[in-house]
Image (cartoon, rainbow, N blue to C red):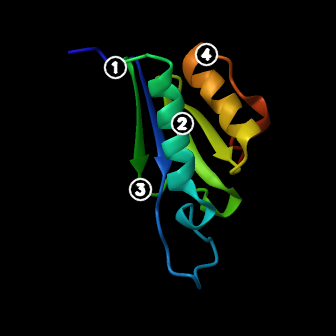
Amino acid sequence: MTQIKKHIFVCVNQRDDDNQKGCCSSKNSLEIMTKLKRMTKSSGRKDIRVNKSGCLGNCEKGVSCVVYPEGVWYTIPNDEEAISKISNHILEGIVASDYLMLD
């Protein structure tokens, strides 16, 4: 069994439509997670795992994502540039500073 060296969690939490915070699910988080998973798989890397998660706490700002073991938190818009830059971090270790989650 391959040892997992990186673990990525993408929030797919779903809240009621009337919730003020909104939710990552309504921002196409499952699609984003699927794209990250496919990009990782197509790289041939078997030491990286991409999973869905419950609420990561910043749904009002966009889709929440965290990359471990670095502990880097992102807010990801559903566009190809953002997904590509996050994938670059996952595969190459280059932090996508434009999408860092800020308080």
Write down the residue under mark 4. Answer: 93
**Mark linked to residue 50:** none
Q: Which residue is mark 2?
A: 36
Of pointers 3 and 4, the one earlier in the residue sequence: 3
Q: CA distance from mark 4 to mark 2?
A: 14 Å
Q: Secondary structure at mark 1?
A: loop
Residue with the most extreme left position: 1
Q: Residue at x 49, y 44 (%)?
A: 34
Q: Nearer the viewer, mark 3 or mark 1?
A: 1
Q: Secondary structure at mark 4?
A: loop
Q: Position of residue 31 (x, y in %)?
A: 54, 52
Identify which residue is drawn at 51% across, 80% down: 16
The picture quadrant where one finds residue 82 is top right
Say whether disc 4 or disc 1 marks the residue closer to the N-terminus.
1
Q: Residue at x 44, y 16 (%)?
A: 44
Indicate which disc residue 4 carries: 1
Q: Looking at this view, is 89 or 72 the one in front?
A: 89
- Mark 3 and mark 1 residues within 8 Å of each other at the beta carbon: no
Q: What amino acid type should be assigned to the residue bearing mark 1?
A: Ile
Q: Is residue 41 above or below residue 66?
A: above
Mark 3 or mark 1, earlier in chain: 1
Three-letter amino acid code at the position of disc 2: Leu
Nearer the observer, disc 3 or disc 2?
Answer: 2
Name the front one of labels 4 and 2. 2
Q: Which residue is mark 3?
A: 54
Let me know if residue 102 appears in the view.
yes
Q: CA distance from mark 3 to mark 4?
A: 24 Å
